[in-house]
Amino acid sequence: MTETVSPAIRIVVAIILLMVVAPLVVPLLMSISDTAFIVFPPQGFTLKWYAAVLANPEARGSFLFSLELAAIVTTVSLVLGIPCAAGLTRFKVPGQDIMLGIILSPLIVPLIVTGIALLQFFSMMNFRATLLQLVIGHTVVCLPYVIRSVSASFVLANRNLEDAAAVLGAPPHVVATRIVWPQVRPGILAGGVFCFIVSFDDYPISMWLADGNHFPIPLYLYTVIERSFDPSIAAIASLMIFFALLLVLVIERVFGINLARLAS
Amino acid sequence: MAAGPVAGRFSRPAEMFWTAFSSTRHTGLFLVAPALLFLAIWFLWPVLSMIVSSFSSHSVDGVMVEGITFENYTRLFSSDLYFRILMRTVRIALLTSLCAMVFAYPLAIAIARGGPSLARLVTITILAPLLVNVVVRSYGWQTILNKAGAFAWILKQVGITSPPVLLYTEWAVLIACVHVYLPFMVMPLAAAIGRIDRTVEEAARVAGATRLKVFIRIVFPLSLPGLAVGASLVFSLSSAAYVTPQILGGNFSPLLGTLIEQQILTLNDWPFGAAISTLLIVMVLTVNLVFLNAVNRRFARWTESAR
């Protein structure tokens, strides 16, 4: 008896999925409306709001800054995270459970609280370099994800292959590059991609640490939503949605990572 | 020279270094130390010192007062305004978990039991919004729930001319929170349902149980560990939500996140802000450690006796 889901469940699932995509589709419709404010259904067709957004230096600056920040954070997290994951899974470490607890603890504390704690800490130490503050704040949040993802792939890697290579006379560095590396690469890739997305989309850490010259795109979007009501916001939102779709495509096609892997 | 053709890329000192390095007693510690130190300095230390500062107070002119006080905590519970915000936060976090659970079950069943193409469609549709910024997703709900938005328009088409005002109420916050945090419920639930032995469900069906009975008696109880993980994730995330309540709740229904932001950035009352933050940590830790542990222990005992 091969039983799949019942038709009733299929219908319910279809309705829920429609509701899930609705808030992503409606801004797309609004963004082409040829009116001075937002109405549904959209009236007319224009691309002028997109032109306005793309010509806006503030929007562009914030977007590029977020990309730069996310790239730095990903690099730092991978540099710190890969050796850590290797150490935790492949070598004896004293007090392993306590260390693991410390490493994963940023995942439990609410992000907004981590942000406040860092702001208070930085001002206590008179530490004023905003970019460095943002990099540290984001890395604190991203590093545990990287370590978890990379550790998982180290655990899954087949140790017999390493032993076989060693028995056949391969020195440790050859085992590391030829046997271990190809097996853990997917975990590193997934961790890095996830880290990039978490940093790029972060609001609750940046809101405490950013300043006018270092203003990530989520903060910029928020201020625009607060102060204006014309369809140009819908256009920025749509551009962000297109960017996310592009990311899905890159993740799935170019990197060959199953999207579900990122969430696990 | 080199150990073989594959090692040709390595200079000899690097190779010798790695061979020596990878076989000492402390190799693991050396590898773990940088990340561990980074998190100890930039996470543990700041968070602990924030918790400590929540027990300090400052006088009216902003000078820190020596000694330990619980005044910041008693203020949170004795002031009617603050207590209402705390209760609203707990209420919204609980309701969000509950609603997310109701929506997540059909989706999780579709992922775990629906065959590869349906599972893939649902997974991608559920996870792709995670890549869209929370600000954008909240804004999407604003455009839907607006007076001139899609929701009002749909109601008008079916003849309801005075649609309920949802935007800038708790309802809008709840709707958007469920949408934003739903994936965190669906994924652990789908994993838990996927682990249930299909033959158990099939046996129940053969023995004459209806689909509903199978769900109530088999799928639901056996998926409880996944549900517990999902519920505590959604509760933790929504109780500390800031962006969504700000954009959809306006000034009329602030949550703890907004209160913290006001106390620190507007009123400059750091000790009180730190106290609210500490309370959030305690809430989240309670749910994650105590609740999850209790569910898992019960579940383990219960499945053991069933065998």
Image (cartoon, helix red, strand yellow):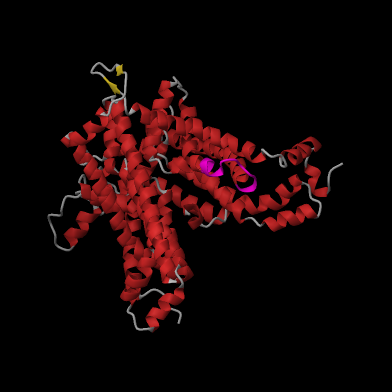
x 34%, y 80%: residue: B209
Residue A212 visible in the displayed image: no
The answer to whether residue B160 is above or below residue B60 is below
- Of A119 and B26, the residue lying toward us: B26
The answer to if A91 sits in the magenta stretch is yes
The answer to if A16 sits in the magenta stretch is no
The answer to whether residue B85 is above or below residue A154 is above
Q: Is residue A101 toward the left or the right of residue B253 in the image?
A: right
x 35%, y 61%: residue: B104
x 39%, y 45%: residue: B133
Q: Is residue A183 toward the left or the right of residue A59 in the image?
A: right
Residue B86 visible in the displayed image: yes
- Of A73 and B45, the residue lying toward us: B45
Residue sticking out furthest to the right: B1
Residue sticking out furthest to the left: B162
- Of B12 and B151, the residue lying toward us: B12
Q: Percent x, y for residue B80?
A: 16, 36
Q: Percent x, y for residue A249?
A: 50, 54
Q: Percent x, y for residue B307?
A: 45, 71
Q: How many marks?
A: 0
The answer to whether residue B208 is above or below residue B30 is below
Q: Is residue A256 toward the left or the right of residue A109 in the image?
A: right
Quadrant (top left, top right, bottom left, bottom right) of the N terminus of chain A? bottom left
- Of B10 and A148, the residue lying toward us: A148
Q: Percent x, y for residue A239?
A: 41, 46
Picture quadrant where residue A55 is located: top left
x 41%, y 76%: residue: B201
In this picture, which residue range is highlighted in magenta?
A: A89-100
